Image (cartoon, grey):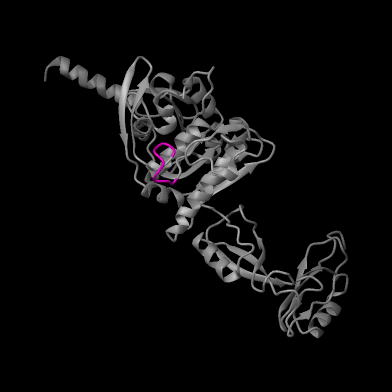
């Protein structure tokens, strides 16, 4: 073999070894064809680590590379605690129209790019990341704020098979599940010419697959938005139904988010599936990526632990409520029945509450109505709090119920009933169990 060829091969192999591993515990800026991205691989990285893609919004006065660096640094402590790899692409102005929506039909917001589409740019980044820090699971979690949230929204309906969960932090535009509305606001085919900086003309012909919206609707998707994010947003196709408008031609990010959530979950329901798009409304916050990041982190932790959002079933019949919970991978259990003006069998409260996170297949207790008056076979539970355990036990027995004694730590003196469940005055069927909580006494009693 010629000497120069041998030298080239040795040099190439040495370069490959030196560049084939990520630097642990440091934010790296890396460049590939068509752009730059930032990467953070924590010291706790393993082949089982999750990948989290963090997509920046836009600030006119800030360069995209600098902004991507700002965004990734908000997630490094999260990566350290969870072992997740954080990737933050920089969608620059010239190639992806990051801070000028007039270029490229919104640029990276709609997955457009001058030389390579924004979604393909991300795919190329992830291909390199998998060489630098290989993981066993090729799907990833996706987070984006504002314009980055628009990217994340459009990405998940075009590539639902590639993501494990999505957090949409206060986007102002969405791709709605409406076939008559053209991309990037709907499912319809888009054919147009796009002008890029430098007098570059680009002809695009995009025909999204409507099946992507259905697949996305059953993925864990959380919209995280502040309750004060109410500045006017111009109406766009599919975004601005009459009840949502704050004027003849404007609405708010909050109103648009609620509409997209409802439309996506309705789409899933129309196909007999359970829609998993939910919303976290953060009190006292406006349109701020930094202020919304803590809530986004909490949501992502729940997604990574494969927990599910508890649906609201108050107001529907218990039998239907149980079916809804089963479709959400939860178990409904009938708990206490209560007097209520609602029809018998209607769920009047639930524990845990709607919108909270729960482990898959965990139990959701449903409290149901027995109507405005108890059935003839129901009797009232006596009040036994404050009595000695034996006196309380006899009182419960005398009322026709089954007492169950439970000793608990308490500063109340030993053998005194400190609580009961169900409470005094509730109406139960004969033989129903009543738990009596009895003090085991202060710890300092000799």
**Residue 357: % across, % down:** 59, 52
Reply yes or no: does residue 370 show up in magenta: no
Whether residue 239 is visible to the viewer of this picture, yes or no, is yes
| Residue 234, image x, y percentages | 54, 32
In the rendered image, residue 417, in percent from the top left (x then y), is placed at 84, 70
Q: Position of residue 124 (x, y in %)?
A: 34, 31
* Quarter holding residue 78: top right
- Residue at 86 percent of width and 68 percent of height: 414
Horizontal side of 33 relative to 65 (left or right) equals left
Where 93 sits versus 276, above or below? above
- Name the one closer to the observer, 89 or 233: 233
Q: Residue furthest front?
A: 248
Q: Give above or below for 418 relative to 296.
A: below
Q: Dividing the picture into quarters, in which one does residue 413 lie?
A: bottom right
The residue segment tinted magenta is: 177-185
> In percent of the image, x 57 and y 43: which residue is there?
242
Number of marks in picture: 0
Would residue 45 be visible to someone looking at this image? no
Q: Is residue 91 left or right of residue 428?
A: left
Q: Tell me the quarter of the image containing the C terminus.
A: bottom right
Q: Quadrant of the N terminus?
A: top left
Q: Is residue 190 left or right of residue 40?
A: left
Q: Nearer the viewer, residue 399 or 438?
A: 399
What secondary structure is the magenta-colored segment mainly? loop
User: Would you identify the image quadrant in which residue 333 lies?
Assistant: bottom right
The reply, left or right, for residue 91 in relation to residue 364 is left
In this view, 247 is above or below 345: above
């Amino acid at each position: 073999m010629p000497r120069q060829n041998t030298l080239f091969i040795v040099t190439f192999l040495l370069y490959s070894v030196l560049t084939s591993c990520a630097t642990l515990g440091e934010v790296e800026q890396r460049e590939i064809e068509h752009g730059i991205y930032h990467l953070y691989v924590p010291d706790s990285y393993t082949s089982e680590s999750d990948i989290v893609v963090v997509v920046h919004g836009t600030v006119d006065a800030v360069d995209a590379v600098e902004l991507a660096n700002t965004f990734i640094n908000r997630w490094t402590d999260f990566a350290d605690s969870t072992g997740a790899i954080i990737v933050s692409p920089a969608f620059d102005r010239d190639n992806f129209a990051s801070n000028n929506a007039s270029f490229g039909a919104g640029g990276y917001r709609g997955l457009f790019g001058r030389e390579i589409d924004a979604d393909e740019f991300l795919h190329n980044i992830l291909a390199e990341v998998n060489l630098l820090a290989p993981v066993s699971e090729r799907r990833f979690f996706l987070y984006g704020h504002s314009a980055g949230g628009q990217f994340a929204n459009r990405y998940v309906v075009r590539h639902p098979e590639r993501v494990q969960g999505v957090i949409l932090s206060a986007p102002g535009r969405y791709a709605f599940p409406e076939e008559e509305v053209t991309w990037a606001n709907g499912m319809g085919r888009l054919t147009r010419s796009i002008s890029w900086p430098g007098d570059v003309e680009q002809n695009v012909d995009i025909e999204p697959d409507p099946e992507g919206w259905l697949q996305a609707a059953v993925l864990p998707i959380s919209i995280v938005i502040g309750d004060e994010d109410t500045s006017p947003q111009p109406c766009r196709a599919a975004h601005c139904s009459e009840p949502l408008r704050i004027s003849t031609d404007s609405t708010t990010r909050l109103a648009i988010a609620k509409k997209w959530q409802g439309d996506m979950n309705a789409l899933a329901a129309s196909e007999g599936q359970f829609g998993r798009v939910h919303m976290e409304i953060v009190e006292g916050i406006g349109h701020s990526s930094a202020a919304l990041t803590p809530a986004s982190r909490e949501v992502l932790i729940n997604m990574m632990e494969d927990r599910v959002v508890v649906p609201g079933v108050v107001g529907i019949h218990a039998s239907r409520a149980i079916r809804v919970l089963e479709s959400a991978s939860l178990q409904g259990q009938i708990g206490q029945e209560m007097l209520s003006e609602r029809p018998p069998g209607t769920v009047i409260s639930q524990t845990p509450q709607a919108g909270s996170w729960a482990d898959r297949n965990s139990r959701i207790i449903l409290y149901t109505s027995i109507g405005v008056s108890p059935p003839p076979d129901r009797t009232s539970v006596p009040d036994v709090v404050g009595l000695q355990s034996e006196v309380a036990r006899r009182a419960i027995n005398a009322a026709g119920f089954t007492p169950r004694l439970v000793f608990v730590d308490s500063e109340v003196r030993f053998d005194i009933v400190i609580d009961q469940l169900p409470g005094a005055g509730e109406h139960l069927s004969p033989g129903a169990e009543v738990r009596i909580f009895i003090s085991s006494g202060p710890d300092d009693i000799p």
